[in-house]
Amino acid sequence: MATIGSQIGQFIERKRAEDGLHRAQAELAHVTRVATLGELTASIAHGNQSALAAVVNNATACVHWLAAQNLEEARQSADRSCETVIGRRNHRPDSRPGQEGAFAEGLG
């Protein structure tokens, strides 16, 4: 009888250990998914922040060139801003070639 009780005790202990292992694996998988999502979010935010900074810098330059009545330089600055926007848009999964349009054509 003692042997059967010992075997049952070992079985219960092993079952608890297996359940704990499964919980730990599930938690690790969840933490990994959350960490990956955080990294992806940070990467997208950084890319957008960089693109927005470039657009603002080029737009500021465009305003200064317009104030100086240098239309060619203003157009080039506007074009650089447009190229930044187009470049970001072309990296979207739903973008199609030829969607660029001509934002600054009326400036020149």
Image (cartoon, grey):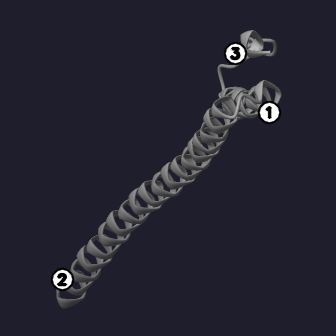
Label number found at residue 73: 1
Image quadrant assignment for residue 15: bottom left
From the viewer's perspective, is 15 left or right of 105?
left
From the viewer's perspective, is 73 left or right of 6?
right
Earlier residue among tags 2 and 1: 2
Question: In this rendering, which labeled residue sits more in front, label 3 or label 1?
Answer: 1
Q: Residue at x 77, y 12 (%)?
A: 105
Label number found at residue 103: 3
Residue 47 in the image: state x and y as whole percent.
61, 48
Residue 5 in the image: state x and y as whole percent.
18, 83
Question: In this rendering, which labeled residue sits more in front, label 3 or label 2?
Answer: 3
Say what secondary structure mark 3 lies in: loop
**Label 2 neighbour load within 10 Å: few <14, some 14-19, many 20+:** few
**Label 1 neighbour load within 10 Å: few <14, some 14-19, many 20+:** some
Residue 99 in the image: state x and y as whole percent.
74, 12
Disc 2 marks which amino acid? Gly
Classify the position of the C terminus by image quarter.
top right
Q: Residue at x 46, y 60 (%)?
A: 35
Earlier residue among tags 3 and 1: 1
